[in-house]
Image (cartoon, grey):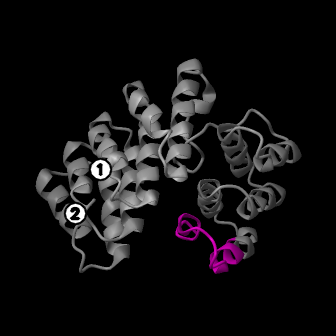
Amino acid sequence: MLQVNENQISAIGRVLNDQNRPLKERFRALFTLKNIGGAKAIQEIHNCFNDESALLKHELAYCLGQMQDSRAIPILIGILKDVTQEPMVRHEAGEALGAIGDPTVIPILEEYSKDCVSEVAETCELALCRLQWLKLNSYSTNLQKSPYMSVDPAPPADIADVKKLKEILLNENVSLFERYRAMFSLRNICTPDSIVALSEGLKAGSALFKHEIAFVLGQLQKEIAVPHLEASLKDTEENEMVFKRQ
């Protein structure tokens, strides 16, 4: 946690909440607050959820989850419940609740796993699966943060074979949680073959699934993924959750 005083945190919060500033500056302020952590930083992030930008609000929820601070739980529950928020924002609030890892959110996740918005329902189901996995695997080495310093919605699968992982990834008869586990294993392997396998996920599956595929391809920062992301970005029929993540 960075050592800064409350006046400095407030100043960063003012940048985040200033709609006249470029988004790039506001994003820098947001991720600075994430790295600072603590109740004051959480409150400054919370203050921004009335913004007009769905993309920014999505990242607000993402950062609250990555902070893994239970003090953010009431904020995230409020966003999840708020049907006036965009589906992309509500989805990320559900994912963030799973990232924090506190089992007290299980009842709310169970309730919203039946939400009428499929992206929200699928996300809450994934978050429930993550919490159950954490309960059963509290001593697993897979609990460590990813090589990309992110708290992921599913742990990587205990499989190293790219072909097998690709089969799981693209099999829509397999649970979404297991497909996500394959996804994060392919990301961590980070070879040309594993990146191409991941890219195949942009062509099929739910908007939520493709949203996460785009995210991990961005984490990899490999040129081989660019044509696949570009093709998806140019698809005007694609769900906004997918092309806003690329």
Q: Does the magenta stretch include residue 239?
A: yes
Picture residue at 41% right of the left edge, 39% below the top: 97
The front one of 40 and 130 is 130
Q: How crowded is mark 2: few (under 14 residues within 10 Å), some or many (20 or more)?
A: some
As shown in the figure, which amino acid type bears the numbered disc 1? Ile
Residues in magenta?
229-246
Q: Is residue 77 magenta?
A: no
Which quadrant holds the C terminus? bottom right
Which residue is outermost to the left? Answer: 7
x, y percent for residue 75: 28, 45
Picture residue at 69% right of the left edge, 51% below the top: 187
x, y percent for residue 113: 50, 39
Q: How many labels does the image show?
A: 2
Question: Which mark is drawn over residue 36?
Answer: 1
Picture residue at 70% right of the left edge, 48% below the top: 183
x, y percent for residue 224: 76, 70
x, y percent for residue 1: 31, 44
In the picture, measured across the screen, residue 217 lies left or right of residue 12, that is right
Picture residue at 33% right of the left edge, 73% below the top: 25
Indicate the quadrant where residue 205 lies: bottom right
The residue at which mark 2 appears reads as: 12
The front one of 222 and 186 is 186
In the picture, measured across the screen, residue 155 lies left or right of residue 69, that is right
The disc, 1 or 2, on the residue closer to the chain's N-terminal end is 2
Q: In this view, does 169 lie above or below 48?
A: above
Disc 1, disc 2: CB below 8 Å?
yes
The front one of 54 and 43 is 54
